[in-house]
Image (cartoon, rainbow, N blue to C red):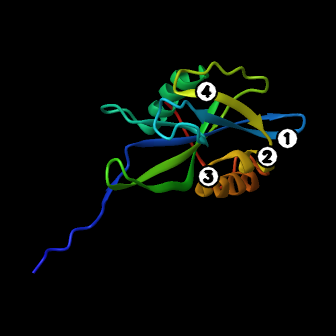
């Protein structure tokens, strides 16, 4: 009789919804992955893997500095987990979704991991994002930004 084995679960890093507020409302930063990277050409959020004993907050700060040259003003743990099947590892990946707030007028400096970026209002960000779970997250986060910080968010420090 064959022994049944489960698909592996892994939580290798984070997904970061970088947001800023301007006079027209909240904007989301969406990034286009460089063609030389995994998921090249796809639009998403800042993502990154954990190194050593880093906390989630430390991963967020490091990845934001590396990918977009920005340090968050504040960071918030949400109740959302971005999950998907990662064929290269044959595992289901589960990444906490962190909201990182940056000041109005924040300038982005892209690393080689990404080829383009846009600051977009939620309805336009949703239409550019490649993954349905991120589009749903934009809806949820947008609702919660109406009462920033949302009651179900917990501030995290690096």
Which is more N-terminal, label 3 or label 4? 4
153 in relation to 51, above or below: below
**Where does label 3 land, which residue?**
134
Of badges 2 and 1, nearer the viewer stands: 2
**In the current view of this chain or complex, which residue is farthest to the left?**
1
112 left or right, relative to 1: right
Which is more N-terminal, label 1 or label 2? 1
**In the current view of this chain or complex, which residue is farthest to the right?**
23
Which is more N-terminal, label 3 or label 2? 2
- Residue 10 is marked as none
Asked if marks 1 and 4 touch (Cβ < 8 Å), the reply is no
Residue pictured at 71% horizontal, 45% vertical: 128
Which is more N-terminal, label 4 or label 1? 1
111 in relation to 1, above or below: above
Number of callouts in the render?
A: 4
**Where does label 1 land, which residue?**
25
- Element assignment for label 3: helix
Compute the Cα span from label 4 to label 3: 19 Å
103 left or right, relative to 8: right
Asked if marks 4 and 2 touch (Cβ < 8 Å), the reply is no
**In the foreground, 124 or 82:** 124
- Residue 115 is marked as 4
Q: Is residue 133 visible?
A: yes
Task: Give x and y (percent) for residue 60.
Answer: 51, 33
**In the foreground, 135 or 130:** 130
């Amino acid at each position: 009789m064959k022994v049944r084995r489960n698909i592996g679960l892994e939580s290798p890093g984070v997904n970061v919804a970088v947001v800023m507020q301007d006079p027209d409302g909240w904007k989301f930063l969406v990034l286009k992955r460089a063609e030389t990277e995994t998921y090249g050409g796809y639009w998403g959020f800042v993502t990154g893997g954990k190194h050593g004993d880093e906390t989630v907050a430390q991963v967020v700060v490091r990845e934001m500095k590396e990918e977009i040259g920005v340090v968050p003003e504040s960071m918030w743990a949400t109740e959302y987990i971005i999950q998907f099947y990662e064929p290269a590892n044959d595992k289901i990946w589960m990444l906490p979704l962190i909201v990182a707030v940056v000041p109005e007028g924040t300038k982005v400096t892209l690393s080689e991991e990404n080829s383009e970026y846009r600051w977009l209002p939620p309805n336009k960000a949703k239409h550019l994002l490649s993954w349905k779970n991120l589009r749903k997250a934009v809806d949820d986060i947008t609702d919660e930004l109406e009462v920033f910080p949302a009651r179900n968010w917990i501030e995290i420090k690096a």
